[in-house]
Image (cartoon, helix red, strand yellow):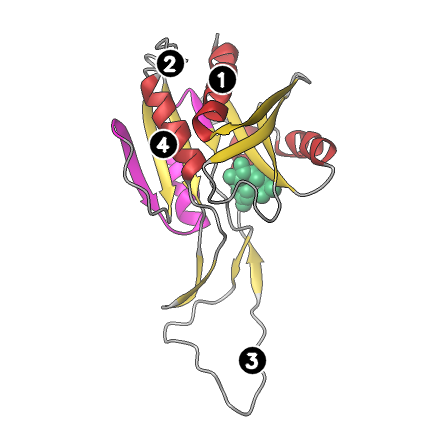
Amino acid sequence: GLAPDLAGRHVVVSAGGTREPLDPVRFLGNRSSGRQGYALARTAVARGARVTLLAANTALPDPAGADVVRVGTTVELQDAVLKAAADADAVVMAAAVADFRPVTYVTGKIKKKEDRDPEPIALTRNPDILAGISADRPRPGQVVVGFAAETDDVLANGRAKLARKGCDLLVVNEVGESKAFGSDGNEAVVLTAGGREVPVPYGPKEALADVVWDLVAESLG
Ligand code: C5P
């Protein structure tokens, strides 16, 4: 992907993982490093795009040439996506998004009580950002891409998720003990809404990113 085939395009990429605070020192979160999203941002810059990177709790240096917006929670990420996607040609949701958040945020640190079992943590659903923008595109004709981490029945679950979310492309990763999270490489299958399956062999996260941008560019025409 050396050709500037994304010149004149605005792409939005989310990266990292959202965190839902319980109290000032604790949160519900996940193990996403943000590396795949950052690889998507770097490769899109290299292909000529204007890139907005929505970074959720990452500890990576800002990619040169991208506009970086930092977010914490799922609701903050949703606000940032809706704002950035208004004039975007493509939205790629590579972030691992917390599906639930605690019902209440405790303003002082939750104390351990020596003689009592802990209170259960009540959770409520977060909005599904990907399903929301797929159903109601902020800009007509924009390409929406999701990611899915599956541990079993990867293709069947991926195909069902693509249909459920309503996105154009779904990058399906098989995850396990040592796969994908925090590693330099990735292996995936990209499913298209048109029924194609594009396998991407194990390799650098940039290689998978370039396959995604190839398909996005093709879809944009
Ligand atoms: O349903 P699941 O979490 O497996 O879907 C993963 C995809 O959906 C990712 O692209 C993720 O960024 C997106 N997602 C979202 N909002 C949520 C949950 C997931 O946009 N609440």
Answer with mark 1 or mark 2, whichever residue precedes in sequence.
2
Q: Nearer the observer, disc 4 or disc 2?
A: 2
Which numbered circle lies on residue 118?
3
Q: On screen, 56 above or below 8?
A: below
Q: On screen, 150 above or below 6?
A: below
Location of mark 1 (residue): 216
Location of mark 2 (residue): 6
State the residue at coordinates (42%, 41%): 34
Query: Dot 3: what SS?
Result: loop
Tell me the CA gap for discs 3 and 1. 48 Å
Q: Is residue 161 left or right of residue 43?
A: right
Residue type at the position of mark 4 = Ala
Q: Can you tell which quarter of the image residue 80 is in?
A: top left
Q: Residues within 10 Å of mark 2 (few under 14, many from 20)?
A: many
- Horizontal and vertical percent position of residue 7: 33, 12
Q: Farthest left residue? A: 64
Location of mark 4 (residue): 84
For the record, the magenta segment spans 64-91
State the residue at coordinates (55%, 34%): 147
